[in-house]
Amino acid sequence: MRIIKVWEQEGAAKLNFLPRMNFAGDANKNIQNHAGTTGKMKDSEGNYYYISHPNFAYVLAYGFHQIFQLPISVISLQSFNLILNFLSALFIFLIVLEISVKNIKLSLLAYALYVFNPAVMWFQCNTYMSDILVHFLFISSLYFVLIAFKNNFKFYSKHSLLLYLFLFIMCLTSWLGYLFILALIVLLFLKFKWKKEFLVPALILIIIPCISAVHFYFQYKYIAGPNALIEQLSDRFSERGIANSLTNGFENYGVILKNIILNHGLYVILLLVLLGIKFKRKISFLKTDSGFILKLSVFPVLFCYLFLPDYSGHDFTTLYLTPFVILYIVVLFHELSPAFQLSKTKANLTLFIFIFLAVGWYYGENLPGELSIKGKRYDCGKVLGETIKTEAETEIPCLLISDTPLGPEVVYYSGRNIFEARDTVEAKNFLKENGFKRGKLFYETSCASIEIRDLSSN
């Protein structure tokens, strides 16, 4: 939200649609809040930039607000999320409709399971970032892949052209698009070998990420030069990658597993039950082209979990698993349904109970009210941010001393960049280095308990 808020204040075109993390004003410069790891992605005016992924997610959200003349707020972004949520569920419906040969009831089942999935209800309805947009693009592209392969992947067909467009947007949004394209090239080769049906689409699929990567490089290199850009990307990949996790004793893999259980626990239990029954029967769908496509399309997600465990340790990445968990549940349920011998009434009751439990699972993890399941207030960051916004002075920096790391929500609600200091000595040094005689110091002693005073650089 901070990036598009900065764009709203200063104009996105004026900033070349670069994801700047600093608000306007000298008092907000040379303060790095969640911008990167090397600290080198800073322009000559002291603004930092977030370059961990391409910027299309910000461009689309900003465009949405500009078209409908909406002020950027939590509510407006949640509304935008709900549109993506509906479209994602719609494509889940269409995917099942395609692989089940127009079974509308099964498609509606998949739609319901998706909409009431705890991970979907939280992340796709409450938060917005590149990962939320690319999740929708991932699902929609998967649908176009299924249709394209059904038509022998004619590179000029309507669905193939739509696939290329969605993949290009996906690459402009997240690196996940590059991994998905790699999986598609493998799919094409396994199906068509070196025939014309492989060569032309494969060439197009190679060109798409190349254009996206060149665009990313030339747009971002002007911030601080190509060397700083490459160094930041390399450092970010190293931090997110498997080497870092190996030195930490595989801790990140445990975090990934915990997040999957917390967000998909009920669905995983159902999937395991169906898989247990599956061992006694043959599942014909998994041997079809559509089944093979679904199996190989999960490759980008598994790659992230295995080789980018620090990134995948973020709880929102469990959203990527959602379509595959639901699709496998629906397929297994459909092929095993004769064994259950459920009447229409019993089937509807079973679905109602499962959805009721899923919603209960969601509220059990995200308790309504003021306190989280851990007994902490939800609004600590908001209270601190709004306090800083009220008490801050435009011409002097905001400084913070706190036992809790500064959250991005604090920066957003305050509308200020905030220098985190370990003590008053470090805070004074920052003021001296940046030519300020004084600053506004905020002590956060506990949640919503804040002491405020002026701090001189002397």
Image (tube, grey):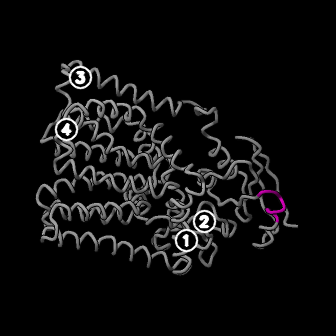
Judged from the image, the secondary structure of the residue bearing numbered disc 4 is: loop
**Label placed on residue 347:** 3
Question: Is tag 4's residue or tag 2's residue first in the polypeptide sequence?
Answer: 2
- The residue that disc 4 covers is 283
Circle 1 residue: 232
Position of 294 with respect to 15 (left or right) is left
Earlier sequence position, callout 2 versus callout 1? 2
Which residue is outermost to the front? 280
Q: CA distance from mark 2 to mark 3?
A: 52 Å
| Mark sitting earlier along the chain (1/4) | 1
**Mark 4 to mark 2 CA distance (whole Å):** 47 Å
* Spatial separation of the CA atoms under disc 1 and disc 4: 47 Å
Out of 84 and 39, give the one closest to the viewer.
Answer: 39
Which stretch did the figure color magenta?
422-428
Q: Secondary structure at mark 1?
A: helix
Inspect the image, locate mark 1, and give the three-letter code of the amino acid beneath it: Gln
- Residue 301 lies within the magenta run: no
Badge 2 vs badge 1, beta-carbon distance below 8 Å:
yes
Give whichever of discs 2 and 3 has the lower sequence position.
2
Which secondary structure type mostly characterizes the magenta part of the structure? helix
The residue that disc 2 covers is 37
Residue type, mark 2 in image: Thr
Position of residue 158 measured from the top left corner of the image (x, y, whole percent):
14, 62
